[in-house]
């Protein structure tokens, strides 16, 4: 099926990716109105696909968006997209936009949702040497403004954080919530390790699939884990700090606001977790073979 040309699912069919277009009247374009998911295909298997689909359907429910296909059909379509692109290791992204009702007005009445699925070769962008992160001025919104559990297309807050961090010469942004607690990095959850205990923020964060995987793996490895409130002090004084996401994996942080973490080197707890995560990616327990072909 793979002809070497990139293929995407859009408008209810598979088309060359370059021809997969959405209308300028789509409310995703006009208002960032839609939801999405990113899932990792690794060695011909999809990692925690059921969990991504479950989170996606909850995002849809939370923003009153009707997915035009069932969860089961969505899983099939995701697999078909990976196969159609001839990929074993892939970054798969699917988007459900509010759609258009023929006018540019901010009235969702009559909009017809549009499902788009794309797959790209997975590129390991994780930093082996570790990132230098900087706390940025812009804060993560509280749940009363935009619920962090919803993986919505409204990412301007995160994009602004990234721009701010890069402008200041840092590799990545560290974002606080409106109370000044450590929250997320743009597109990543945050972990700190202190005296062998793993801690991660619990308020106003996306419940990352990678975050959850790390919490479980660490507990299984006998580590104490804690979803809690974290102050900047906790990051500045941690033995290790790292970020997690589907696309990025487990990424070491070696500097926070000019403070060197763990002597400026990725730490041993992260290294053990990275090994466990790599094993988990292709385990029967958590990954689904890409069927058919
Ligand atoms: N937080 C935000 C805001 C995200 O967009 C993401 C995913 N890109 C994450 C955390 C990490 O989530 P996951 O591990 O499920 O990819």
Image (cartoon, grey):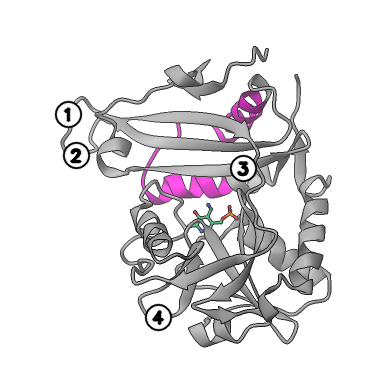
Q: Which residue is mark 3?
A: 39
The label nearer to you, 4 versus 3, is 4
Task: Note whether 192 is above or below 21 in the view shown.
Answer: below
| Along the line of sight, the residue nearer the viewer: 136 or 215 | 136
Distance CA(mark 1)–CA(mark 2): 9 Å
Residue extent of the magenta highlight:
54-82
Tag 2–tag 4 contact (CB < 8 Å): no
**Residue 211: image location, x then y, percent:** 63, 62
Distance CA(mark 4)–CA(mark 3): 31 Å
The kind of secondary structure element at disc 4 is loop
Q: Report the side of 8 relative to 215 (left or right).
A: left
Q: Indicate which disc residue 107 carries.
A: 2
**Residue 168: image location, x then y, percent:** 40, 66
> Is the residue marked 1 within 8 Å of ligand 1, measured from its CB?
no
Q: Main secondary structure of the magenta part?
A: helix
Q: Which is nearer the N-term, disc 2 or disc 4? A: 2
| Along the line of sight, the residue nearer the viewer: 84 or 242 | 242
The kind of secondary structure element at disc 2 is loop
Q: Which residue is mark 4?
A: 180
């Amino acid at each position: 099926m793979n002809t070497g040309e990139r293929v995407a699912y859009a408008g209810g069919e598979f088309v060359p990716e370059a021809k997969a277009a959405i209308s300028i009247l789509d409310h995703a374009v006009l208002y960032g109105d839609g939801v999405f998911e990113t899932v990792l295909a690794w060695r011909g298997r999809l990692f925690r696909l059921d969990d991504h689909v479950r989170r996606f359907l909850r995002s849809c429910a939370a923003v009153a968006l009707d997915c035009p296909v069932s969860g089961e059909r969505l899983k099939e379509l995701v697999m078909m997209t990976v196969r159609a692109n001839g990929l074993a290791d892939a970054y798969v992204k699917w988007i459900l936009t509010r759609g258009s009702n023929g006018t540019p007005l901010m009235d969702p009445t009559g909009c017809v949702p549009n499902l788009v699925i794309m797959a790209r070769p997975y590129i390991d962008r994780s930093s082996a040497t570790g990132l230098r992160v900087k706390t940025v001025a812009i804060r993560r919104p509280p749940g009363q403004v935009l619920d962090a559990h919803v993986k919505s297309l409204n990412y301007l807050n995160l994009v602004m954080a990234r721009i701010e961090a890069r402008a200041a010469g840092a590799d990545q942004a560290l974002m606080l919530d409106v109370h000044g607690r450590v929250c997320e990095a743009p597109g990543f959850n945050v972990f700190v390790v202190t005296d062998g205990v793993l801690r991660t923020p619990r308020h106003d964060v996306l419940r990352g699939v990678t975050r959850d995987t790390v919490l479980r793996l660490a507990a299984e490895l006998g580590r104490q884990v804690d979803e809690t409130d974290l102050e900047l002090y906790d990051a500045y004084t941690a033995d290790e700090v790292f970020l997690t996401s589907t696309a990025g994996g487990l990424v070491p942080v070696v500097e926070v606001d000019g403070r060197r973490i763990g002597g400026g080197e990725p730490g041993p707890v992260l290294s053990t977790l990275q090994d466990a995560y790599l094993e988990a990616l292709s385990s029967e327990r958590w990954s689904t073979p890409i069927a058919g072909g």
